[in-house]
Amino acid sequence: MPKSSPRVRLAAVALTAALFGASAPVAYAAFDDPDPKAAASAPVRAVGKPYVKTELLFGTAKPNGGSPVTDKEFRAFVDEVVTPRFPAGLTVENAYGQYRDAHGKIEHERSYKLTLLYPKGEARTAGAKIEQIRATYNKRFAQESVARVDDNELVDF
């Protein structure tokens, strides 16, 4: 069987997720109305305004066996670097992950997931701030990278 490219696999995963996601509102609508035909044809009203959700994944292991980034160091980083750029709010979650480093070694490490929400119209400005955050973390804690994931969302507060 021929191997498919990462782009083809990613497209297939995205299409599958979209198909499952498109069917979910209809399924939940059926619980609200005893008439399945009415539920299937009822429009689903989107709630919220267009926002971008950016998730940043910060590893804590330092190369060459250095001591990992501590909770205290990470909180200080958030207070000094992230909060001034995104004072409206953010979420930090403890995580555990792994990655293959530049030398091919799989590193297992405690990590942090930082979630930022900002209006879609501010994406260009926010993107520059996010890149400053990533570069500062890499430099301060001798990291190879900080992963970034961006998604379009509808958000209501």
Image: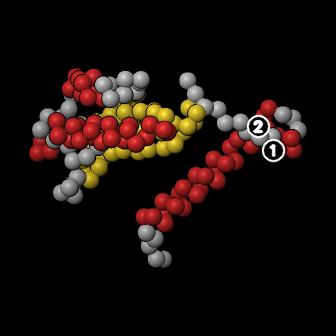
**Residue 65 visible (yes or no):** yes
**From what the image shows, is residue 35 above or below residue 21?**
above
Q: What residue is disc 2 on?
A: 29
Q: What residue is disc 1 on?
A: 40
x and y percentages locating residue 46 in the rendered image = 67, 36
Q: Which quadrant would residue 61 be assigned to in this image?
A: top left
**Contact, CB < 8 Å: mark 1 with mark 2?**
yes
Q: Which quadrant would residue 97 be assigned to in this image?
A: top left
Q: Quadrant of the C terminus?
A: top right
Q: Residue at the spot x=49%, y=39% of the render?
A: 120
The circle drawn on residue 108 is none
Q: Nearer the viewer, residue 47 or 26?
A: 47
Give the mark count: 2
Q: CA distance from mark 1 to mark 2?
A: 7 Å
x and y percentages locating residue 18 in the rendered image = 61, 52
Residue projecting furthest to the bottom: 1
Say what secondary structure mark 2 lies in. Answer: helix
Horizontal side of 6 relative to 143 (left or right) equals right
x and y percentages locating residue 118 in the rendered image = 46, 33
| Of the image marks 1 and 2, the number of the one nearer the N terminus | 2
Q: Which quadrant would residue 6 be assigned to in this image?
A: bottom left
Q: Residue at the spot x=67%, y=48% of the render?
A: 22
Q: Nearer the viewer, residue 53 or 13?
A: 53
Horizontal side of 11 relative to 113 (left or right) equals right
x and y percentages locating residue 20 in the rendered image = 64, 50
Q: Residue at the spot x=11%, y=45% of the render?
A: 64
Q: Nearer the viewer, residue 123 or 62?
A: 123
**Residue 61 visible (yes or no):** no
